[in-house]
Amino acid sequence: MDATAITDSGTSRSAASITLQDVGKTYPDGTVAVGDFSLEVRAGELTVLIGPSGCGKSTILRMINRLIEPTRGTILLDGQDILKRNPVELRRHIGYVIQNVGLFPHQKIGANIGTVPKLLGWDSARVKARTEELLELVGLDPAKYRDRYPHELSGGQRQRVGVARALAADPLVLLMDEPFSAVDPIARGRLQEEFLKLQAEVRKTIVMVTHDIDEAVRLGDRIAVLAEGGKLQQFAPPAELLSRPSSAGVASFVGADRGIRRLAVTPVRDALQPSDGLQAGDRPTVDITGTLHDALAAMLTVDSAEVIVVEDGRPVGTVSRSAIFDTPAPAEA
Ligand SMILES: Nc1ncnc2c1ncn2[C@@H]1O[C@H](COP(=O)(O)OP(=O)(O)OP(=O)(O)O)[C@@H](O)[C@H]1O
Ligand SMILES: [Mg+2]
């Protein structure tokens, strides 16, 4: 994407890459929140930052939109140095979802979502149309929710409004700091699912912070595991992180059950033994879009040694128990 796409009309339809080069932040009291951090965030991907409390995740996120100024290093947005840009103007192209959402309490939901488009000078009809479109996108009926105040929504609904607001001016980048932390595990699972669908549609460059390894594995295209002082331990797609952790520290961080987690991110396709003339009969089936976790679950349910894989309802091959155990993690994309 070229610089001309970053216009004050806020109508860019692209996502931007983010490059952090030797970035560091030492707070005035001498705390080295981030020592020397480098990362390449690809355009249109969701990158997760995960690591122990206080390791510098929020600091990194906030340096990307210049809410915090780095004390060293360079940050590039599509190759352009963000430190050379006006921070206020920069932030209009970066959606930011903070923990606890941060909606304006005295403004209605519609006004909350329309904040940045209004700042960008969109006319009111366009702001209204965009607000309705976004409410639909995050699964909230505009007629019902547009004129409510934030306190009249549930926590999960507020988080959706937070996401809608961050997407409002079609930003180049979305920064999300523990966006789903305030909801219970069931609502959280649903929000994550909706969010994956949303991302499949909008394909934003997203940097998301979480404490939850399951959330990281489920949502992330790539996961950066950090240690104290913003030290990058490993940066890899979920399946690779789970099957080949780079150190004992990362292995223990991703958990003793990482082998089971890995099955959930390995496609059935990778273990498929194709064959013709299969009849599903009463053997368990799994869809070709499923994972090895789905295949194993189906086998265990009926105590079978293999499952039939179906595509568009037709059998295309099998996955055996041994194939599940022998299938390596997907290679790096
Ligand atoms: N304004 C500040 N002045 C001094 N130190 C700070 C300041 N803000 C943050 N820190 C310190 O910088 C370090 C990194 O903080 P940061 O908020 O980035 O951590 P985090 O990884 O987001 O943690 P958490 O998971 O708990 O949110 C911490 O040790 C924190 O105490
Ligand atoms: Mg934080």
Image: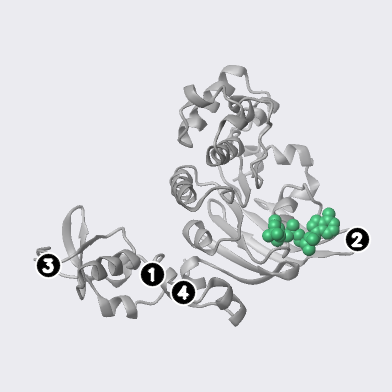
Q: On the rendered structure, is 90 left or right of 181?
A: right
Q: Is residue 294 above or below residue 128?
A: below
Label 4 CA crowd tier, 10 Å (few <14, some 14–19, many 20+): few
| Amino acid at pointer 1 | Leu
Element type at mark 3 = loop
Q: Amino acid at mark 3?
A: Asp
Within 10 Å of the Cα at label 2, are there few (<14), some (14-19), or many (20+) other Cα atoms? few
Give yes or no for contact between labels 1 and 4 (Cβ–Cβ under 8 Å). Answer: no
The secondary element bearing badge 2 is classed as: loop
Q: Residue at x 24, y 70 (%)?
A: 299
How crowded is the residue under tag 1: few (<14 C-alpha within 10 Å), some, or many (20+)?
Answer: many
**Ligand 1 within 8 angstroms of badge 2 C-beta:** yes
On screen, residue 22 versus residue 248, left or right, reads: right
> What label sits on residue 257 in the rendered view?
4
First in sequence: mark 1 or mark 2?
2
Q: CA distance from mark 1 to mark 2?
A: 45 Å
Q: Nearer the viewer, mark 3 or mark 1?
A: 1
On the image, numbered disc 3 is attached to which residue?
A: 276
Q: What SS does tag 4 mark?
A: loop
- Comes first in the chain, label 3 or label 4: 4
- Specify the label residue 29 is tagged with: 2
Residue type beneath disc 4: Asp
> What is the C-alpha distance between the residues marked 3 and 4?
36 Å
Q: Are marks 1 and 2 in contact (CB under 8 Å)?
A: no
Q: Secondary structure at mark 1?
A: helix
On screen, 135 above or below 309? Answer: above
Q: Which residue is mark 1?
A: 263
Residue 125, given in percent of the width and then of the height, sits at 57, 17
Q: Earlier in the sequence, mark 2 or mark 3?
A: 2
Label 2 with label 3: CB-CB less than 8 Å: no
Image coordinates for residue 23, horizontal then vertical, percent = 76, 62
